[in-house]
Amino acid sequence: MTTTVAASVATGKKIRPSLVIAVLAFAGMGASFMQTILIPIQAQLPELLDASRDDTAWAITVTLLVSAICTPVSGKLGDMYGKRRVAIVLLSLLIAGSVISALSPTVVPLIIGRGLQGTGMGVIPLGISILRDVLPKERLGSAIALVSATLGVGGALGLPISALVTENFDWHVLFWVAAAIGAVALALFVLVIPSGVSNAQGRFDLGGAFGLAIGLVGLLLAVSRGNEWGWSSAPTLISAGVGVVALLVWGWYELRRSNPLVDLRVSARGPVLMTNLASVAMGFALFSSSIVFPQLLQLPESTGGLGLPLLEASLILMPSGLAMLAMSPVAGRVEKRVGPKPLLVAGAVIIALAYLAAVVLEPTVWLVLVINVVIGIGIGLGYAAMPTLIMRAVPVTESGAANGLNTLMRALGTSIASAAVAAVLANSAVSSGGGSVPSESGFALALLFGLAAAVLCAVLALFIPKPRSVAEEEPAFPEGVLPHDKAAPQTDLLRTQ
């Protein structure tokens, strides 16, 4: 097949698959880059903004909360009103948030801007769903692998970029860089990504979105701030309690809706449920190393660390993201041969072996580099398999919402890892030079957590059943023809983006 395809019935535009994939991957990396943009200066934020550490912590937390809420909501909106249209709105909000952050002299506008930046994460599940709509079946596996991997790639590549900028320029320049990335992604989206057919049936489930937001905010606040507030403190317990109760009520409400935000009956299907649980475990495995290795690399040698400055440590960690990118075509070819389930199992096993080596071998800079690359390979394989497993088990009209929920599950795993590993390192800290640093036993236990999560992911993946959904039997669509186009001719009764 040629790379230039026939005109889409929906838009009259020619669809160039390679260009579409590149634009969606760039947009996904730009969105995930926002998650790590402040890490190099997180410790300096109180001084830079003349605010308390508790207040500046919200500049990190708010992005997590907004992105968690936005991914399933934007997926459903994309299914109803058009994925391209919703993605363009999200990228516009990301740019606005970047500009607000770049102009912020105090902590409050920075928090507002960071919240708007968090909406950009919804672009990744929307991009995966767009691939399903516009690509022929034979190109879908590697394309999904590439766009899905951007969840980890953006962070891995973003850390050294952020470190380089902050070491040489005013910290506000970080956000001008973010705004530029968002602007380029938006322009490419408008020019390259084809419009699809919307599938709006009934009203958007505003009550479901509100209930999910309350539940996620409660749980994620407890998880992300529990180390600072204290796990048995009133704020942590109240947040967790509100989150659990709100999600239970939300689930009851969703089951009674004709057009729910998240179709829990579909989500409870074996393939979808087990894939989402495995996604939580793999998200945990990914982020365990993301917390341990930066600290291990930067701590002074006298305290058991490897004594690297921030920029050098970031460059050591960056190849992990490149490994995820490199695995995309490999994952696509393997998935064609053996299917997505063995791919997910293989990815989890590779991650587990890497963590096992990290636990039993004496840490060196080169060992951390190699282990982190191997983890990146495993994550690249696993993240390639998850969206395919999900989309094989759900109708095409729900692919956006289902991918949004799966992305949320991965983010939930990283959030739990962040809290659990931080708690382990804090509780194992020893005094050094008037302060406290994580101990060797703390690092070892944190790496064991990552190993356990990878093993759990492999076990869960083994028990993913074969989907019985019609989605599994969907035929490949001709290049340039959207799934909806095949089902019915384009008429004025069908709204386009």
Image (spheres, rainbow, N blue to C red):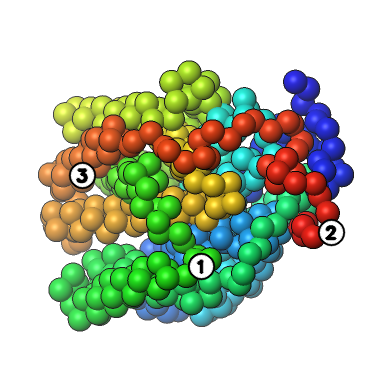
Binning the other alpha carbons within 10 Å of mark 1 as few (below 14), some (14 to 19) or many (20 upward) gives: few
Residue matched to label 2:
492
Q: Given the image, on which type of amino acid does mark 1 rest? A: Ser
Q: Which x, y percent locates residue 34?
A: 53, 56
On screen, residue 488 versus residue 93, left or right, reads right
Query: Residue drawn at (38%, 30%), measured in percent from left and top?
Result: 341
- In front here: 399 or 168? 399
Residue matched to label 3:
449
Q: Given the image, on which type of amino acid does mark 3 rest? A: Phe
Whether 143 is drawn above or below 168: the answer is above
Residue 197 visible at all: yes
Residue matched to label 1:
258
Q: Which x, y percent locates residue 6?
A: 83, 32
For marks 3 and 2, the one nearer the N-term is: 3
Query: Residue drawn at (34%, 75%), measured in percent from left and top?
Result: 249
Quadrant for the N terminus, please. Answer: top right
Tag 2's secondary structure? loop
Query: Residue drawn at (56%, 57%), measured in percent from left and top?
Result: 75
